[in-house]
Image (cartoon, rainbow, N blue to C red):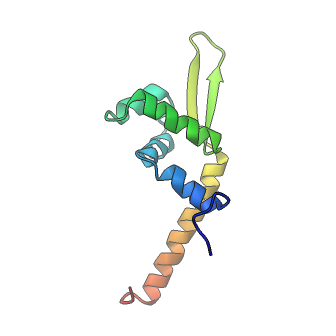
């Protein structure tokens, strides 16, 4: 099976979440950090430009949703998309599968 391919969805997902600090962004969004400034304060070594780029990439790939309220002042909120939760469930399922295999043969590497 060829993993490294532009058409491989798993490779594309791993490429996206493998970018520097993306996992932290996803974790923060899962913990109800929903604004750019909250996320930016929680990851002090990440520049605003990089954070903005990462959020745009996650949006473009339907892993994060952006909600803009029309109230003054404008409020922009981010949240994990339904697709992300489906992906997370598959990741959990894979972890459980690996764990259950390990339980059967704990000494096998």
8 or 41, which lies in front? 8
Residue at image point 55% right, 70% down = 94
Report the label total.
0
In which image quadrant can residue 62 be found?
top right
Residue 4 image position (x, y, % from top left): 57, 64
Residue 72 image position (x, y, % from top left): 60, 9
90 or 7, which lies in front? 7
In which image quadrant can residue 40 be found?
top left
Location of residue 63 with respect to 43 vertically, above or below: below
66 or 49, which lies in front? 49
Location of residue 97 with respect to 4 vertically, above or below: below
Residue at image point 57% right, 42% down = 58
Location of residue 107 with respect to 10 vertically, above or below: below
36 or 8, which lies in front? 8
Instruction: Name the quadrant of the N terminus.
Output: bottom right
Residue at image point 42% right, 28% down = 48
Residue at image point 31% right, 35% down = 45
Q: Residue lying at the far left in this picture: please name it.
A: 45
Residue 15 image position (x, y, % from top left): 52, 54
Residue 11 image position (x, y, % from top left): 58, 60
Location of residue 80 with respect to 72 vertically, above or below: below
In which image quadrant can residue 60 be found?
top right
Instruction: Name the quadrant of the C terminus.
Output: bottom left
Judge from the rendering whether residue 26 lies leftward or rightward of residue 44; answer left or right: right
């Amino acid at each position: 099976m060829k993993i490294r391919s532009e058409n491989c969805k798993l490779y594309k997902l791993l490429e996206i979440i493998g970018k520097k600090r993306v996992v932290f962004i996803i974790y923060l969004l899962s913990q109800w950090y929903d604004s750019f400034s909250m996320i930016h304060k929680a990851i002090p070594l990440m520049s605003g430009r990089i954070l903005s780029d990462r959020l745009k990439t996650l949006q473009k790939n339907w892993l994060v949703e952006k909600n803009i309220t029309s109230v003054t002042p404008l409020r922009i909120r981010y949240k994990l998309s339904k697709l992300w939760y489906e992906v997370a469930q598959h990741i959990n399922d894979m972890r459980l599968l690996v764990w259950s295999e390990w339980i059967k043969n704990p000494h096998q590497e």
